[in-house]
Image: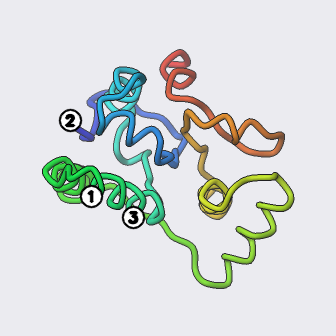
Amino acid sequence: MSYKKSAGLETKVKYLVDTNVWLERLLDQEKSAVASRFFDLIPTDNLFVSDFSIHLIGVILSRLKKFDILKKFINDLFVNGRLEQLSLNSIELLDVIANIQKFKLDFDDSYQFCIAQKYDLTIITFDKDFNVKGIKKNTPDEIIEKL
């Protein structure tokens, strides 16, 4: 698995990759090939990950005892890929609560949405909970089709 810069392909859109896209690829699930193609096409300069996603992926992979995959993921993202991890400050958690109420999102989706708003990012997700007016999101498939 690689999250390195793609040669020759430039895009101005910046993406916050949701937890489910990372997990599809890491756990070689049903949509792994699509996620992998997305990561191959988009330069890492245009990809971001939330601290919430990193922690949740760590919890899930640890529970599954997939420590080698977790180590490789961290190395690929932050050592080799130099992806930027984004977070919210404590006060911004009030926005998370407001968006839970406004958009009927759960906490983790609202957290991702708040980060996307804060940094003007498009959310890349397989999660249909983001199919709400006012949320900039795409699936990896949609981005691949545009390219």
Total marks in image: 3
Q: Position of residue 79 (x, y in %)?
A: 18, 58
Specify whether 4 is left or right of 128. Answer: left
| One can see residue 9 in this view | no
Q: Which residue is drawn at 39% across and 42% down?
A: 22
* Cα separation between marks 1 and 2: 19 Å
Q: Residues within 10 Å of mark 2 (few under 14, many from 20)?
A: few
Where is residue 136 shown, x and y percent of the image? 70, 42
Residue 118, position as x, y percentages in the image: 64, 64
Q: Distance between the residues labelled 3 and 1?
A: 10 Å
Looking at the image, is 69 positioned above or below residue 79? above
* Circle on res. 28: none
Residue at disc 3, secondary structure: helix
**Label 2 sits on residue:** 1
Does 108 appear above or below 95?
above
The numbered dot on residue 55 is: 3
Whether residue 125 sits left or right of residue 70 in the image: it is right
Please report whichever mark, 3 or 1, sits nearer to the chain's N-terminal start: 3
Which amino acid lies under the numbered mark 1 shown in the image of this protein?
Ser
Asked whether the residues under the numbered discs 3 and 1 touch, taking CB atoms below 8 Å apart as contact, a structural biologist would say no
Q: Position of residue 78 (x, y in %)?
A: 25, 59
Frontmost residue, 12 versus 17 = 17
- Colour theme: rainbow
**Residue at left offset 71%, top offset 68%:** 96
Amino acid at circle 2:
Met
- What residue does disc 1 label? 62
**Real-space Cα distance between discs 2 and 3?**
19 Å
Q: Do the residues labelled 1 and 2 touch (CB within 8 Å)?
A: no
Q: In this view, does 127 lie to the left or right of 47?
A: right
**Do residues under tags 2 and 3 come within 8 Å of each other at their CB atoms?**
no
